[in-house]
């Protein structure tokens, strides 16, 4: 085991209180905001910028504080960037933020940067590298305790003679950063990132120099590479072709054959491994050593019909030698558990997050289930009898003070808004309209106040800082201004409350009213639009780590940190609810991606539900704070065991049901709390009972009934706590084995019997289909539970509303569409190449969720053999995210000689249809230019025949003699068609047009975005 962190670098000594909570809110809180605070006074009135009916100010309110740190960073956040750095707002709240947002006692370089698997620290002579496999553990297994894989420098990679005064940021991508050094004579640039065992360097002005902490043991020094051991771990340095390395004492040096680049890899072996094993790995890594990673990018898709979230992590590489691509990639547990299409190597790295598995290539993809969220738990158990009387009393007690605001800053305002939203949701279910409406009025009044920047206003106002690209609410709290901490925590409450209000008052939530201000809060905390230059993309969310970081600067010896993961999930759920309530599927889907990804990460890194990721000798099965270097059974604000555990549960809403995905872990975590506490909790009992209800609802209900005189947590109410626990006792536990084609749906199971729940917040009926075949009809505005328990209630009909057309078009199409039989389904398909697991036949199997995928190169083709020559009508392509930008549709009678039928030069993916003519047996998509760095991938490749030929249509002016009077259409005439529209109820047999093609409804449903007729063959057939 390595020695513990020295006091000057201990995470504890670097902590600044980020949040102060007191049970019962009975005492004053003193928060030390840290050094470097800059109070800026402004003379004159606030300068308001309007957005709809709302407004924010671009003049700093009187007495307000800006982000603060070293130098003049308050007004110049680009102070530590080179001219090469990307334009636009600077990223914050990242694993490497202390390199850019310098603060505290390190104004020249940075605190340690825990990238995983390696950690780094810039110094005057270059970049320090550390890889640790032994955890430093402090505290006890029953009290406060921490574990860390601390930064302990093994190597400094640099340039001979380099003595830079500071390290700057030269560039960044989704999960990499490039620090830069210069001393006037020598320069160094290094690219490091999450999941990269290799680090990449470019140097000028001198030889490459590796300075080792103590004499290394070289186990190979051949040609342009040297492998060595130090501190029990193995490293390899790769120079350009023709270069050599010289080992002298504790330094390793190369002139790089005058080419100015090299790379250093940390191997997953230990120094005790056989030399042959090390050399074999060095050979394997060497194939990628000079493919320098120059960019990383994440893309995701939410397949609503399948209830899946797919994420692709792509690496752009530049070949310094040769023309190869790809790199060595280490995956965190929340990634490799859901990996699809790749097979990891047998070796693994040790990391603070658990074992990291290795894949090779330019990208990898994960596929996760999205099992849904709810606006609120349905009232299946407290809507009748004595429990109805109990909940009614609790709700009526909240009539005059549903928010119970504990403060006027952004955090405590948010907590109060969240409390009022829970009251409104439950009261609506039980038809207590006076309680509901009063709670909604409180939400509306307080949000409108915050969303209005009137002249001279300095409180309850949002300020946009163009230098930082951030929106700060004042009064700020817990350094949300000076450190840019916690914006996702604070603003998530605002957005969630706005979503509840939007269901009942859609006019207030419209973009022309206050919806635009809600959107600004979303974009500030986690901007979902890469093209929006006002805010950084996904500010608070670490794309590769899979979770948020709370600190804006991350300037701690243990890296960045996140305490209340559940408040991060509250933000993600708020996006789902707001997007669904306002019909904004882009926001909704961003929330679904955040929520699904982070749920997986939380269950791995905060709760370690499989007991695989925490050090075996730590003794805790739960971590309240995740640090870059480890975890802590502790909080920023209290030593109470109940608060240490409860901080990752609040606020308990229908978006926190992921906490129940592993019921045994729930029971284990609660049992550890009781053990460590020496008995049942005496504070925050409501939060902990609600959590326990996800693993043992009957026990939680018994505890509530026996101790209902407890003091509520500051953001909770007895009404909500009782409602949550009582109804989970009726529903049972979360069932993660079933998904739905509707975002606001969930399945529960009790004693093997399922209850299906769905919430419809629109003004039109909805049919929800579950992955096990169950269908559920949900009337407008209702939440319905059906199965083992049955209930229906609610009156929210304002969300996501689109008024269906009331008058059909008066002019029918002059040329009826040419329809033909589907010829390609089930026929023989072949392709130029196949990505493992995605063969060609999956493009013609009739399953809308399977796909063919090619190798990541041009050109590529996919063809289908129709079995015999057929008259052709059209071809339909349903592209996955990896689409073809340039391609031809080709036909052939013999499979050898091809004719171009269609040429596309600027394809954009999605679903496309191309008309065909003539007769052919073979039809091919011949891709010549990819639209993404990946290959070509088609969910479906459908070839249709032609039934039109040259036969003219029947006359339209002279009806047949058997035709009834002109006002009655012939019995053989299809129903009149209207244009397809979202949020419209369609009955079976209804005919619509979409992009000029006629479709007939096969199953009654209410349409949603993504359910366009070509996309859902289960609902629509070409007419």
Image (spheres, rainbow, N blue to C red):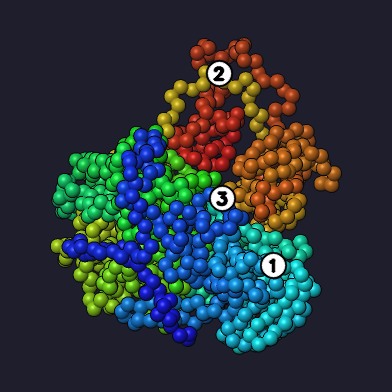
Left/right of residue 1015 with respect to residue 327 in the rendered view:
left
What residue does disc 2 label? Answer: 811
- Mark 3 vs mark 2, CA separation in Å: 51 Å
Whichever of callouts 3 and 2 sits on the residue coming sooner in the sequence is 3
Give the label on residue 366, or none. none
Are circles 1 and 3 on residues that touch, CB within 8 Å?
no
Q: Nearer the viewer, residue 245 or 844?
A: 245
- Graded by Cα atoms within 10 Å as few (under 14), some (14 to 19) or many (20 or more), the crowding at tag 1 reads some
- Name the element at disc 3: loop
* Viewer-side label of 1, 3: 1
> Where is residue 361 shown, x and y percent of the image?
66, 64
> Where is residue 66 shown, x and y percent of the image?
38, 54
Q: Residue at x 75, y 52 (%)?
A: 858
Give the vertical position of 551 relative to 1000 (above or below).
below
Q: Residue at x 55, y 37 (%)?
A: 1013
- Name the element at disc 1: strand
Left/right of residue 425 with respect to residue 707 in the rendered view:
right
Q: Nearer the viewer, residue 50 or 44?
A: 44
What residue does disc 1 label? Answer: 204
Q: Nearer the viewer, residue 628 or 191?
A: 191
């Amino acid at each position: 085991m390595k020695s513990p962190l020295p006091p000057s670098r201990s995470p504890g000594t670097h902590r600044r209180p980020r949040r102060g909570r007191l049970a019962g809110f009975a005492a004053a809180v003193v928060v030390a905001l840290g050094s470097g605070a800059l109070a800026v006074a402004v003379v004159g009135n606030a300068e308001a910028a309007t957005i709809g009916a709302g407004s924010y100010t671009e003049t700093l309110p009187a007495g307000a504080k800006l982000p603060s740190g070293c130098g003049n960073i308050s007004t110049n956040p680009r102070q530590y960037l080179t001219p090469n750095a990307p334009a636009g707002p600077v990223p914050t709240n990242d694993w490497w933020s202390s390199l850019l947002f310098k603060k505290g006692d390190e104004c020249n370089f940075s605190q340690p940067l825990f990238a995983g698997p390696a950690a780094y620290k810039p110094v005057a002579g270059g970049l320090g590298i550390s890889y640790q496999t032994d955890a430093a553990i402090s505290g006890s297994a029953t009290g406060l305790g921490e574990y860390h894989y601390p930064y302990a420098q093994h190597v400094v990679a640099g340039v001979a003679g380099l003595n830079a005064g500071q390290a700057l940021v030269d560039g960044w991508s989704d999960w990499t950063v490039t620090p830069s050094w210069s001393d006037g004579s020598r320069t160094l640039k290094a690219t490091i990132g999450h999941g990269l065992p290799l680090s990449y360097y470019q140097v000028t002005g001198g030889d490459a120099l590796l300075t080792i902490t103590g004499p290394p043991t070289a186990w190979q020094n051949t040609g342009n590479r040297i492998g060595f051991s130090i501190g029990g771990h193995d490293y390899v340095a790769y120079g350009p072709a023709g270069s050599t390395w010289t080992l002298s004492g504790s330094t390793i040096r190369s002139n790089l054959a005058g080419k100015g680049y090299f790379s250093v890899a940390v191997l997953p072996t230990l120094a005790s491994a056989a030399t042959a094993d090390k050399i074999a790995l060095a050979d394997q890594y060497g194939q990628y050593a000079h493919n320098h990673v120059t960019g990383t990018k994440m893309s995701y898709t939410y397949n609503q019909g399948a209830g899946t979230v797919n994420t692709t992590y792509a690496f752009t590489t530049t070949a310094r030698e040769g023309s190869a691509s790809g790199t060595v990639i280490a995956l965190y547990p929340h990634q490799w558990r859901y990996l699809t299409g790749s097979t990891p190597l047998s070796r693994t790295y040790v990391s603070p997050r658990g074992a990291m598995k290795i894949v090779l290539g330019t990208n990898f993809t994960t596929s996760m289930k999205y099992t849904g969220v709810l606006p609120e738990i349905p009232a299946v158990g407290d809507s009748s009898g004595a429990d109805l009387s109990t909940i009614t009393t609790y709700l009526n007690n909240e009539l005059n003070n549903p928010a119970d605001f504990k403060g006027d800053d952004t955090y405590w305002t948010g907590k109060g808004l969240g409390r009022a939203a829970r009251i409104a949701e439950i009261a609506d279910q039980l038809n207590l309209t006076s309680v509901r409406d009063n709670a909604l009025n409180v939400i509306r009044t307080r949000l409108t106040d915050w969303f209005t920047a009137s002249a001279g206003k300095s409180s309850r106002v949002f300020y946009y800082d163009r230098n930082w690209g951030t929106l700060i609410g004042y009064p700020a709290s817990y350094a949300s201004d000076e450190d840019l901490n916690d914006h996702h925590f604070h603003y998530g409450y605002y957005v969630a409350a706005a979503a509840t209000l939007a269901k009942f008052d859609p006019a207030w939530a419209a973009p022309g009213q206050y919806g635009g201000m809600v959107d600004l809060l979303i974009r500030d905390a986690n901007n979902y639009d890469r093209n929006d230059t006002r805010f950084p993309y996904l500010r608070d969310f670490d794309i590769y780590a899979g979770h948020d970081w709370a600190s804006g600067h991350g300037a701690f010896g243990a890296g960045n940190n996140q305490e209340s993961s559940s408040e991060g999930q509250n933000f993600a759920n708020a996006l789902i609810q707001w997007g669904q309530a306002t019909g904004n599927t882009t926001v909704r889907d961003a929330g679904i991606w955040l929520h699904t990804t982070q749920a997986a990460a939380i269950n791995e890194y905060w709760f370690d539900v499989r007991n695989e990721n925490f050090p075996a000798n730590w003794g805790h099965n739960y971590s309240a704070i995740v640090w870059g270097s480890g975890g802590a059974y502790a909080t920023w604000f209290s030593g109470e065991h109940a608060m240490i555990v409860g901080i990752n549960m609040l606020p308990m809403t229908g978006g926190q049901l992921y906490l129940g995905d592993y019921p045994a872990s729930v029971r284990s975590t609660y049992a550890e709390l009781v053990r460590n506490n020496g008995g049942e909790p005496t504070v925050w009992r409501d939060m902990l009972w609600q959590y326990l209800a996800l693993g043992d609802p009957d026990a939680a209900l018994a505890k509530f009934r026996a101790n209902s005189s407890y003091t509520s947590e500051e953001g909770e109410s007895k009404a909500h706590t009782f409602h949550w626990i009582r109804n989970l006792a009726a529903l049972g536990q979360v069932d993660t084995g079933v998904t739905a084609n509707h975002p606001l749906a969930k399945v529960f199971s009790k004693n093997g019997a399922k209850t299906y729940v769905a919430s419809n917040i629109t003004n039109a009926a909805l049919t929800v289909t579950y992955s096990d075949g169950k269908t559920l009809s949900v009337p407008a505005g209702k939440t319905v539970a059906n199965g083992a328990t049955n209930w229906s209630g609610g009156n929210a009909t304002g969300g996501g509303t689109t008024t269906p057309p009331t008058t059909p078009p008066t002019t029918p199409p002059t040329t009826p569409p040419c329809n033909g039989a589907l010829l390609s389904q089930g026929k023989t398909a072949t392709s130029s190449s196949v990505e493992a697991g995605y063969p060609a036949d999956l493009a013609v199997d009739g399953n809308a969720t399977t796909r063919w995928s090619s190798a990541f190169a041009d050109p590529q083709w996919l063809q289908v053999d129709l079995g015999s020559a057929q008259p052709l009508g059209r071809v339909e392509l349903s592209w996955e995210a990896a689409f073809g930008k340039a391609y031809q549709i080709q036909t052939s009678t013999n499979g050898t000689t091809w004719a171009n039928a269609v040429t596309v030069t600027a394809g954009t993916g999605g679903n496309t249809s191309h008309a065909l003519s003539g007769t052919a047996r073979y039809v091919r998509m011949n891709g010549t230019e990819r639209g993404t760095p990946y290959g070509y991938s088609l969910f479906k490749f459908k070839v249709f025949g032609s039934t039109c030929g040259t036969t003219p249509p029947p006359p339209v002016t002279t009806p047949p003699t058997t035709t009834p009077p002109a006002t009655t259409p012939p019995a053989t005439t299809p129903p009149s068609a209207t244009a397809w529209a979202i949020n419209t109820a369609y009955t079976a047999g209804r005919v619509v047009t979409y992009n000029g093609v006629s479709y007939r409804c096969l199953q009654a449903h209410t349409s949603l975005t993504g359910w366009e007729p070509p996309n859902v063959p289960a609902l629509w057939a070409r007419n």
